[in-house]
Image (tube, helix red, strand yellow):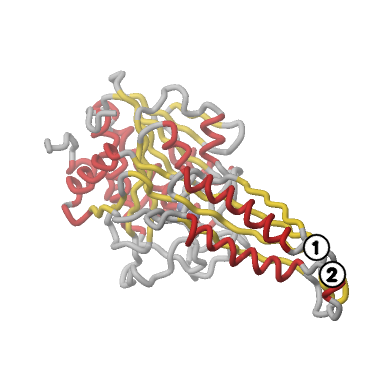
Amino acid sequence: MNALVIDRELWTTSGEALLEDAVALRRAIHAEPELGLDCPKTTAKIKRALEGLPLELREGPSTTGLVAILRGPQNGRTVLLRGDMDALPLREDTGLEFCSQVEGAMHACGHDTHVAMLVGAARALCAQRDRLNGTVVFMFQPGEEGWHGAKYMLEDGLLDDPRPDAAFALHISPNMPAGMFASRTGPLLASADEFEITITGKGGHGAMPHETIDPVPIAAEIVLALQTLVSRKTPPNESAVITVGKIESGTTDNVIPETATLLGTIRTLDERIRTLLHQGIERVATHVALAHAAKAEVEISPGFPVTVCDGRIVALAERTAMALFGEDAWRTMPTPMMGAEDFAYVLQQMPGAMAFLGAVPEGGDYHSCCGLHSNRMVLDERVMARGVAMHCAMAEAFLNGEAVV
Ligand SMILES: [Zn+2]
Ligand SMILES: [Zn+2]
């Protein structure tokens, strides 16, 4: 393996120097979280932080996402760095001094840190513009938490010109040692689809079930039967999850309702298995209902595709993390995770990778501390210095011709 052409000292020092600003920006965004595709206050904070930099900004029309383009003196390759912006609809219970001031919204997935790190990287790379052998595209995207923000930004043509040759993103995680990076080649995260099953029977008196078609036991039977799609239909060496997260039926103890609904999620790492489960859910639900003279209607809403990392960009991330912070700073993940990411849409269109960045809070145990999406999730903000340096060094290395794609 040849030595990486990056300036280790420059980027680690830049990351440290920008940490204070990154913490301030992260805290401001944390205190004022926004949901979905419409995050105007967050966009305004980003624009303020980027003011005066030699960036070309692009926005709209479908989201409040922002693309900032930095052109180096050379017309070389183009690399995309991405940070997501949106929060989650839950109440924060961390007790942090900068905790959410918005009832029912919290940055529990750390996207506030992603924005802060990407702004830091933009500032550091702008300061070193003259040494860049190409173009850096900074993608600030809202609507990651199930809103397909990346897909809308792609459809809006925000990444068409210049077309990036590769993409890189970081996701913070309290469940890893602070400052460690991790990823893997191939599937990193799962596809995530939502399904809703409506079972229609015939309502009536709770004491006279024989005169009704009770949808409740049918719903229960379907919940169990769906699990055999994972245990009996999915090849044992493949991964799949079917979770029924919500069951709804009835109003009181002595009335048999007419309908029951099931709401659930489907996770896979492979398009073939994804199709197999879609077809299986439809088949099992309708036929179990039919066996009891009821009717089941199945609606499947396709969500994020599988997040697939390109081996060349993962290898570059590994070498970059090690060059910046030593051998211990990288871990290759043995298996994917069954969570999902809408960065998957970007990776469908260009080779790239997402890496996790460990941020277990000081004194915490990364095995047992509150994870992403928890109302008590806290992070070690100091790792943002490493995130900034990693973004910058990845961009520099790729523009210098590393990771031929
Ligand atoms: Zn999340
Ligand atoms: Zn996230």
Amino acid type at image mark 2: Thr
Determine the CA span between mark 2 and mark 1: 7 Å
Question: Compared with residue 362, is residue 84 higher up or lower down, i.e. above or below?
Answer: above
Tell me if label 2 and label 1 are in contact, CB under 8 Å: yes
Does label 2 point to a residue whose CB lies under 8 Å from ligand 1? no
Residue positioned 45% across, 42% down in the render:
343
Residue at the far front: name it. 291
**Looking at the image, can residue 254 be seen?**
yes
Quadrant for the N terminus in the image? top left
Q: Nearer the viewer, residue 205 or 351?
A: 205
Q: Is residue 287 above or below residue 313?
A: below
Query: Relative to the observer, which residue lies in front, 191 or 128?
Result: 191
Q: Is residue 192 above or below residue 123?
A: below
Question: Where's residue 88, x and y in %?
Answer: 56, 56
For marks 2 and 1, the one nearer the N-term is: 1
**Could you say where residue 160 lies in the image, as x and y percent from the top left?**
47, 24
Characterize the local packing of mark 1: few (<14), some (14-19) or many (20 or more) Cα atoms within 10 angstroms.
many
Reading the image, the residue beneath label 2 is 212
Image mark for residue 221: none
Query: Is 112 on the left-hand or right-hand side of 397?
Result: right
* Drawn side of residue 295 relative to residue 305, left or right: right
Q: Is residue 111 visible?
A: no
Residue at the spot x=49%, y=66% of the render? 374
Residue with the most extreme left position: 2
**Mark 2, secondary structure of its residue:** loop
Name the residue beneath numbered marker 1. 201
Q: Position of residue 105 (x, y in %)?
A: 58, 59
Q: Hey, which residue is sitting farthest top in the picture?
A: 75
